[in-house]
Amino acid sequence: MKITMIHGQNHMGSTYHIGKLLADKLATEDEITEFFLPRDLNHFCKGCYQCIDDDTKCPYYKEKRSIIDAMEKADMFIFTTPNYCMGPSASMKAFLDMMFTYWMAHCPREWMFRKKAVVISTAAGAGTKQAIKGVTRSLFYWGVPFIKSYGINVQAMNWAGVKADKKIKIEKDMNKFAQKVARVKRPRASIKTKFIFFIMANIHKAGWDSSPVERKYWEERGWLNKERPWKK
């Protein structure tokens, strides 16, 4: 299984270690590609809208493209982000912002509808649910059909400070999680995904696009008629 990991921090903290535990149970080292934010994409979206008309016009296209290429080749994504003030890290949020054209409201990619994704978050206290939600929302609107999450309060500032009994629990949790993920061979789009896609198709039919490019994108793929990306 090919896995692309996107970490919401540069340093290898508790969230990173849990994500790596899961990845190592599902894939060999040469099947895992990792990116660290902000190291591998140290920018915020400028809101210039250039990517709507042409992806390559994004001022940060080269860095963003290397991550997207790895995601397209992968069978599964693992996103890791610790809780930052009841949300994902700023660098993770910045990456998600620069992926807004991948939402079903704009120009979703067919290959997203075949992927599996796991979102992992830790906190010293509370807040993992909010951090996870900030990522899973984007994954859903990208069309990813299989999305699971794992959040845990580690009561520590770093992985070295996590108590032994907590690490034992995490290890057991990741064993169960890996089995659950591995059982799903071919993820299928949910009724909710299909419904949202149907709504977006009608919006594009009505011409309520951000740009004429969006309607053309949907027309070329037959999505304004009966073609659907999850049937490919």
Image: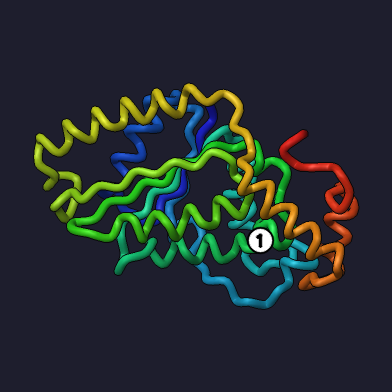
Q: Is residue 37 above or below residue 53?
A: above
Dividing the picture into quadrants, the one containing residue 8 is: bottom left
* In the image: residue 69, left or right of residue 201: left
Tell me the residue at 80%/72% (across/down).
Answer: 208
Q: Position of residue 35 (x, y in %)?
A: 47, 48
* In the image: residue 125, left or right of residue 118: left
Tell me the residue at 45%/29% (across/down).
Answer: 181
How many residues crowd around disc 1 within 10 Å: few (fewer than 14), some, or many (20 or more)?
some
Q: Position of residue 29 (x, y in %)?
A: 43, 27
Which residue is under mark 1? 61
* In the image: residue 199, left or right of residue 150: right
Q: Is residue 97 above or below residue 33?
A: below
Dividing the picture into quadrants, the one containing residue 92 is: bottom left
Tell me the residue at 56%/23% (across/down).
Answer: 185
Tell me the residue at 51%/28% (across/down).
Answer: 31
Q: Looking at this view, is 165 or 48 the one in front? A: 165
Q: Is residue 182 above or below residue 101?
A: above
Q: Position of residue 150 (x, y in %)?
A: 34, 43
Q: Looking at this view, is 151 or 56 the one in front? A: 151
What's the coloring here?
rainbow
The quadrant the C terminus occupies is: top right
Count of picture labels: 1
Q: Position of residue 176 (x, y in %)?
A: 33, 26
Q: Looking at this view, is 229 or 46 the one in front? A: 229
For numbered disc 1, what is the local secondary structure?
Answer: helix
Q: Amino acid at mark 1?
A: Tyr
